[in-house]
Amino acid sequence: MIVDWDDAYANAPHIQGGAEYPALYEAKAAAFRERMEGEGRAELDIAYGDADREKYDLFRPAGEAHGLAAFIHGGYWRAFDKSIWSHLAAGAVARGWAVAMPSYTLAPNARISQITRQVGAAIEAAAKQVEGPVTLSGHSAGGHLATRMICRDTPLSKAVSARIRRVVSISGVHDLRPLMMTQLNEMLQLDEAEAIAESPALNRPVAGARLMCWVGGDERPEFLRQNDLLANVWTGLGADASATRAPGRHHFDVIEDLENAESMLSALVAG
């Protein structure tokens, strides 16, 4: 029985050197952007709406793109932006895919339902720039947002939805109701109705949905449960859904395989 819901969803205190990861990723992301800009393969701060954070970056492969892979960042819907995660496009770009990375308005300035609509608008805009299949991936809160795009009430158009080949939710939070019992909800402002409406595990997948729920084997028990939950529920609703636990990975390093074009994770998001 969980008695401390804040601790159940806290990651940094349970990871050695956890507080150092944002600075590490920021430096790696800046170096990747500099290289891609130098090669003329980075288009930064493309607006998809009128709000300050309604922008995305697009990284292109050396030749014609096989398709579009969109990565949605995490941070509990309240932190970070696209610029900290640029380096995670490396694997997919090396595999010949264009990669879009959007920012979105953070809580408490936007509710999760609004963020869902913003991410949909970003994907719609990026899909106009790159032909071919589309894959979606996201980490933590980004995993939630990626899976929201293939729920029955998706904000995506039918044309873009039809192009989605696969969604990879990495350490995603798929049932938002437990977050109502955390201090985090002072910023998220979730009520029962929105928590239910915005939870992929309480929604139905679109017809033909293909989903991989990916989590680090050493993650917190709640993230392991949330990972397996969505794959279990959606399999029972007719989706092609499965769950994987990456051995030895925790919440902050589970995404690092996206830098490696030969990794299984990169093959899922760009293949």
Image (cartoon, helix red, strand yellow):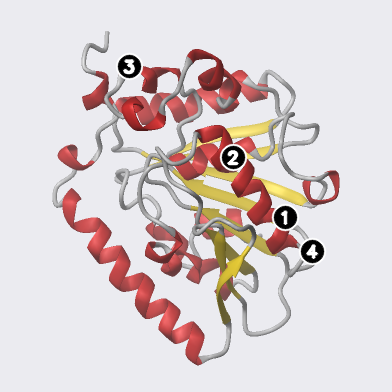
Q: Are marks 2 and 1 in contact (CB under 8 Å)?
A: no
For residue 132, the mark is 4
Residue corresponding to mark 1: 124
Q: Residues within 10 Å of mark 2 (few under 14, many from 20)?
A: many
Residue corresponding to mark 3: 181
User: Gap in Å between the C-alphas at discs 4 and 2?
Assistant: 23 Å
User: Gap in Å between the C-alphas at discs 4 and 3?
Assistant: 42 Å
Labels 2 and 3: the sequence-earlier one: 2
Label 1, secondary structure: give it.
helix
Residue drawn at 30 percent across, 49 percent down: 252
Drawn side of residue 218 relative to residue 14, left or right = right
Between label 1 and label 4, give the one nearer the viewer: 1
Who is closer to the viewer here, 184 or 245? 184
Q: Amino acid at mark 2?
A: Thr
Q: Amino acid at mark 3?
A: Met
Q: Residues within 10 Å of mark 1 (few under 14, many from 20)?
A: some
User: Gap in Å between the C-alphas at discs 1 and 3?
Assistant: 34 Å
Labels 4 and 2: the sequence-earlier one: 2
Labels 4 and 3: the sequence-earlier one: 4
